[in-house]
Image (cartoon, rainbow, N blue to C red):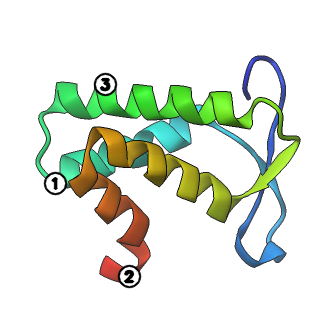
Amino acid sequence: MTGGKAIDIIKRGGHRPTESFERPKLHASIRAACLSVRSPDGVAENTANNVCDAVIIWLEKKPEVTSADLRRKAAETLESYHPEAAYLYKHHRLVI
């Protein structure tokens, strides 16, 4: 939920039901990417907060977005804070 408004996230391929945007879910994934490249916990936490804030501003005027668009925007924002973590975040499906 962003500013009291629910944003629907259309899941990959459109085969699964949409789900509402959840900041904690995005925060956890950004933080995990940062920790995976050995960022200190405080840096990972601050980076995740900054990326979430930027993504929420981007989401404000959108009634729905695809999960791919959400991931792309989060990775693009993360790139300016932590390029190594952004690479991992962008390519995690290929790496794991």
Residue at (26%, 52%) from the top-left corner? Answer: 83
At which x and y percent is residue 76?
A: 46, 51
Up-down relation of residue 19 to residue 88 (above or below): above
Residue bearing the label numbered 3: 46
Q: In the displayed image of the protein, which residue is found farthest to the front?
A: 80
Residue at (67%, 35%) from the top-left corner? Answer: 58
* Element assignment for label 1: loop
* Element assignment for label 3: helix
Residue bearing the label numbered 2: 94
Q: In this view of the protein, which residue sits in the foreground, 2 or 60?
A: 60
Give the mark nearest the N terminus, 3 or 2. 3
Dividing the image into 4 quarters, which one contains the C terminus?
Answer: bottom left
Task: Give the number of the disc on residue 37.
Answer: 1
Q: Answer whether labels 1 and 2 touch (C-beta < 8 Å).
A: no
Count of residue discs = 3
Residue at (84%, 63%) from the top-left corner? Answer: 17
What is the spatial separation of the Cα atoms under label 3 and label 2, in whole angstroms?
A: 26 Å
Residue at (55%, 58%) from the top-left corner? Answer: 72
Badge 3: how crowded within 10 Å, few (<14), some, or many (20+)? some
Quarter-wise, where is residue 90 in the image?
bottom left
Badge 2: how crowded within 10 Å, few (<14), some, or many (20+)? few
At which x and y percent is residue 36?
A: 20, 54
| Amino acid marked by disc 3 | Asn
Quarter-wise, where is residue 82 in the image?
top left
Give the mark nearest the N terminus, 1 or 3. 1
